[in-house]
Image: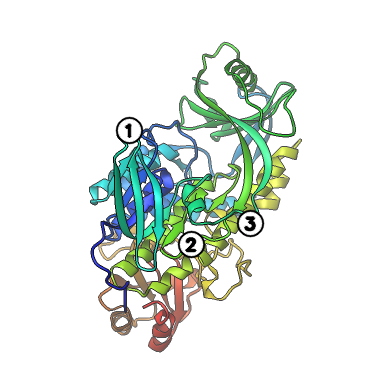
Amino acid sequence: MSGSRDVGPVDVPVLVVGAGPVGLSTGMFLAHWGVRPLVVDKRPDAMAAVPRASTSLRTLELFRSVGLEPALEREGWEGGLPMRTVFKESGLGATLHRGSLPPRHAALVENCSPVPPRRVLTHDQVQRIAYEELCRLGGEVRFGVRLVGLTVDDDLVRARLVDVATGDEREVTARYLIGADGANSEIRGRLGITMPDRTPIGHLNTAFYRADLGPVQRDWGTHVCFVRNDAVYATLMSKNGRDQWASHILDHPGKPQDGPCELSEDATLALLRAAIGDATIPIELQAVNAWEAVIGMASAFRRGRAFLAGDAAHVQSSAGGLGMNTGIQDGHNLAWKLAAVLRGRCVPTLLDSYETERRAAVRASLTVSRNLLQGYQSLDGDPNALYEKLAVDYLRGMMFYGYPSYGAGDDGPWPDPLDDVVHIGHRFPHRWVNSPSGRRISTLDLIGSRWTLFTAGGELPRWRAAAAASLGTTGHAVHELDAPRVAELAIGDDAVLVRPDGFVAWRGTTEESLRAALRGWR
């Protein structure tokens, strides 16, 4: 095992630029694995945004894996199942269609995770939880601080930071830098990284507002409603299960087709009232923006000791709700690897896998985002044919993507998500099991956020010794699964090694093959 060459003291091990949900989550994951980062954001009010993006099951799993289940229970609220929608003449009007994933795919979503499938948190709640946990673990967050100079050397990152209120400057040295500063990333530009395939796929307006619509979500059976009438084609999406809403205004009479269209407050309110279906309900408009939905990936996710995550690395439409979540999963993938390298537990070449793995996951996420938005734009009837067509894309983009570090090409072949058993390069499946104390827990709880070896067939002492020899002093666990779970997971006679991020790194029957699987990383 070896880490970075000692080049003297540094101010921080990792500098994270951007304190949105991706940057703060990445910083929190780093701190969880023992690395205290500095997170900076040029916005003094980066935490004061209206609720926008919402969480996916996989993102909630990741927060749960680092001990944040109590915060998720406290902050979360109940929405509809993922991809469950209702199509109406207006929010309070007649129902035209109800849409959902096909039954087998919907059943998988309901049972594939220990997280309640209807639980929802919005991006501001994610920020707050991550911020509080990051600070509790000793990380530092500074708002109103802008990066104005950057040098990435072979051994160090040197960043010049300025306080936007006082003009005071400070130079910070770090072992690594993560740019999580959004779609118009300054870090990406400073690194000379482009986004050559950036493709516009639509122009929308999004309004954020408060309104009391009564028990509509109970009537809808979900928190996502599409409205189409003579005045507007729009969404009504709850952001707290009560009175906080966001609406994508997809089309309306007079909308120009060649670019974003700014809407006045009066025009926005008129369209929202037409979407709701009751002009007497008070609406507190908080913000409205015109934006261009685009799809694209950066030409690189890394330059030496500097990495990109979230919208800095890839952009997509809001269709499918995976954009923020894909970025948080970038940070989770990168954080455990940086921590392992910085703490001398893995060799620096481990970091080469970040871009390879995340490009495959991002490609899956962008596929569903592109196809869903284009499907919604042309939809004029029952949505279930669209959901049938895109069900596998959605499941793969949301949770069942694979990492090509384990033999498959960037585009697979990947197993069918409905085949929810152990596959190398994929997330270890959730199953309920009994803990040694007799309490029912998830297989994901047995993993937590550490290297974990699962065994079957009464060979626990043998594999405990093998794990100790292969993983050394790295925090790890070894668990024996009972015969029914072994059969459910299609493990057979194999032992299965799971990485700290929950992905299967190896399966086999010999200690030598286990050592060989880890040889390039440790």
Give, as a three-letter code, the residue at label 2: Arg
- Mark 1 is surrounded, within 10 Å at the Cα level, by few (under 14), some (14 to 19) or many (20 or more) other residues, namely few
Of 313 and 427, nearer the camera is 313
Q: Secondary structure at mark 3?
A: helix
Question: In terms of image quadrants, where is residue 519?
Answer: bottom left
- The residue identified by callout 2 is 302
Residue 331 position, x and y percent, is 42, 55
Q: CA distance from mark 1 to mark 3?
A: 49 Å
Q: CA distance from mark 2 to mark 1?
A: 31 Å
Number of the front mark, 2 or 1: 1
Q: Is residue 482 visible?
A: no
At horizontal 37% and vertical 47% (from top left) the residue drawn is 24
Q: CA distance from mark 3 to mark 2?
A: 30 Å
Residue 165 is marked as 1
Give, as a three-letter code, the residue at label 1: Ala
Number of the front mark, 3 or 2: 2
Residue 398 is marked as none
